[in-house]
Amino acid sequence: MANEALLTIDYTNDFVADDGALTCGKPAQALDDHITELADSFLKAGKWVYLPTDVHQPNDPYHPESKLYPPHNVRGTWGRKLYGQLGNWYEEHKDDEHVILMDKTHYSSFCGTPLDLRLRERKIDTLHLTGVCTDICILHTAIAAYDLNYQIVVHEKAVATFDPAGQDWAMRHFKNVLNARIED
Ligand code: ZN
């Protein structure tokens, strides 16, 4: 039987809220119910819920994203807090050892983080991906997971981006190139 974990990636105010610094807007806001239900169902089933969450220093001159985007997900700010119902759910469950918010500083949840070690310690072989943006951080995380031999499940109704063409392209890439299973 597969040993599964849920990854809920970058579902923060800056990436989701109307006034977020780098928001996906309405398509991301529309995921809130489903993404929260998935987190709750994984936790209730005794599975692991990881929340790899972008974090930055403001205007870090050494970080490549400083040349690409305005400051976002700055540590300690409202923008870096988890959005909406998922944010409430996290506050209720953050002391549960199965709920783990993890700092990340690049697109992939594996880049510069202990995520792979933590998953291997727990014998997890299958990763369920949710969050934003489908064609940026979800995509880069999926590619890294594929290269590390994890089975990937992408929840189509729990991932979003600001770019409809990017959403379509990434969903095809997950399925056809990364051998992901697609679920709701
Ligand atoms: Zn970033």
Image (cartoon, rainbow, N blue to C red):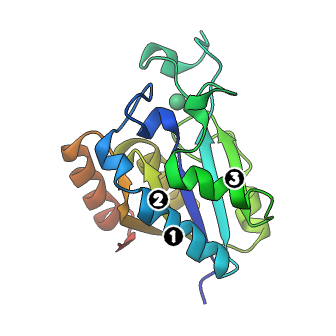
- Residue 65 placement, left or right of 48: left
Name which residue lies at 52% across and 45% down: 83
Label 2 sits on a secondary structure element that is strand
Residue 84's x, y, as percent? 50, 48
- Residue 66 placement, left or right of 5: left
Label 2, label 3: how far apart the Cα atoms are = 19 Å
Residue identifier under label 1? 38
Name the disc covering residue 90, or none: none
Name the disc covering residue 130, or none: 2
Residue 116 seen in the figure: no
Can you tell which quarter of the image residue 111 is in?
top right
User: Residue 56, relative to residue 95: is it above or below?
Assistant: above
Between 148 and 6, the residue placed more toward the observer is 6
Residue 24's x, y, as percent? 35, 38
Label 3, label 1: how far apart the Cα atoms are = 16 Å
Mark 2 surroundings within 10 Å by alpha-carbon count, few (fewer than 14), some (14 through 19), many (20 or more): many
Mark closer to the chain start, 2 or 1: 1
Can you tell which quarter of the image residue 1 is in?
bottom right
Name which residue type carries label 1: Leu
Can you tell which quarter of the image residue 126 is in?
bottom right
Name which residue type carries label 2: Thr
Q: Are marks 2 and 1 in contact (CB under 8 Å)?
A: yes
Residue 129's x, y, as percent? 48, 61
Residue identifier under label 3? 91
- Residue 87 placement, left or right of 124: left
Q: Which of marks 3 and 1 is in front?
A: 3
Name which residue type carries label 3: Glu
